[in-house]
């Protein structure tokens, strides 16, 4: 079985901010995760990632807030997207 693209979305706001979300269903989990998804969700301001959610090989599920990385507990794709968008809204309200 090959990886299957679940969703791919990119929006560039008039001010240049970018939101991009890519989620794949993969045949085997990306270690150390146990779920079958590979994902990258990012919010970019002034050409710099300020919010990001991803699951790199060796790191597992995690999120980025500015330059700080935090663990993230993955439940499902819908919750992942909701959590990401909530973090983007929080960033916008603070900055």
Image: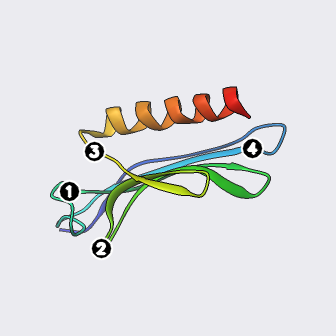
Q: Which element carries disc 1, helix, strand or loop?
A: loop
- Is residue 79 shown left or right of residue 30? right
Screen quadrant of the C terminus: top right
**Residue at x-position 25% and y-position 67%:** 30
Q: Which element carries disc 2, helix, strand or loop?
A: loop
Q: Which element carries disc 3, helix, strand or loop?
A: loop
Q: Earlier in the sequence, mark 3 or mark 4?
A: 4
Residue receiving disc 4: 17
Q: For residue 1, what is the image quadrant?
A: bottom left
Name the foreground residue: 1 vs 43.
43
Residue receiving disc 1: 36
Determine which of the numbered discs, if any, sits on residue 58 in the image.
Answer: 2
Determine which of the numbered discs, if any, sits on residue 73 in the image.
Answer: 3
Mark 2: give few (<14), some (14-19) or many (20+) Cα within 10 Å.
few
Q: Position of residue 77 (x, y in %)?
A: 31, 40
Q: For residue 12, what is the image quadrant?
A: top right
Q: Which element carries disc 4, helix, strand or loop?
A: loop
Q: For residue 73, what is the image quadrant?
A: top left
Q: Earlier in the sequence, mark 2 or mark 4?
A: 4
């Amino acid at each position: 079985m090959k990886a299957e693209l679940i969703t791919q979305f990119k929006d560039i706001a008039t001010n240049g901010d970018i939101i991009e979300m890519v989620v794949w269903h993969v045949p085997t989990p990306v270690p150390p995760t146990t779920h079958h998804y590979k994902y990258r969700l990012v919010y970019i301001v002034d050409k710099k990632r300020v919010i990001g959610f991803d699951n790199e090989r060796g790191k597992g599920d995690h999120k980025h807030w500015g330059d700080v990385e935090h663990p993230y507990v993955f439940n499902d794709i819908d919750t992942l997207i909701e959590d990401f968008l909530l973090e983007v809204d929080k960033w916008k309200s603070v900055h």
